[in-house]
Each structure stands twice: as C-alpha cells, then as structure tokens.
Amino acid sequence: MPLYNYQCESCDHSFEAMQKFSDAPLVDCPACAAPSLKKAVSRAGFRLGGTGWYETDFKTGAKKNLAGADKAD
C-alpha cells in the first residue's frame, strides 16, 4: 500500500498515511479535527542512477544483439 503525505491548511500539521488506492482521501486533521486536509506532494522513494539500461547489460555470448538480429538486410 502506498504512503500519502497530508498537510492541514488550518494548523499546518503534516503526516503520512498508508492507504489503499481505492480509499477515499482523508479530510479531518488528527491534530486539530478541522476538515481541511490536503494531499501534499512528495518526492519519490527511489532514485534511478547511472547512464541508463541497455539491451546488452545482462546478456552474454550470442544473445548480445537481439534487436539487430531481427532486422532484415
């Protein structure tokens, strides 16, 4: 289940909530009980590093150029 960040517009209280995709967004603030919660934008929990992934990264021997083998000359 994904984590969602919420922030209260009344008291600025912020917190994370684990919810299903199908769950309705939370509305009531747990700190002040005001119905003024908004979902906050957060950064991703992972980072893709390096120069990228290529067809040849995990292949050995004759399997190195599979895309080129399909082309007709």
Image (cartoon, rainbow, N blue to C red):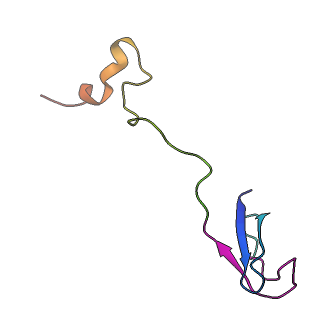
Q: Is 9 on the left-hand or right-hand side of 51? A: right
User: Percent x, y for residue 1?
Assistant: 74, 56
Residue 31 painted magenta: yes
User: Percent x, y for residue 38?
Assistant: 69, 79
Report whether residue 68 is seen: yes
Q: As rendered, which of 8 and 35 lies closer to the eye?
A: 8
Q: As rendered, which of 69 and 1 lies closer to the eye?
A: 1
Q: Main secondary structure of the magenta part?
A: loop
Above/below status of 56 relative to 14: above
User: Percent x, y for residue 55?
Assistant: 36, 30
Above/below status of 65 relative to 13: above
Above/below status of 66 relative to 19: above
User: Percent x, y for residue 27?
Assistant: 78, 82
Give the extent of the magenta segment.
25-41
Q: Is 54 on the left-hand or right-hand side of 49? A: left
Among all residues in the image, which is located at the extreme left? 73
Q: Quadrant of the C terminus?
A: top left
Query: Residue at left 47%, top 39%?
Result: 49
Query: Residue at left 80%, top 88%?
Result: 35
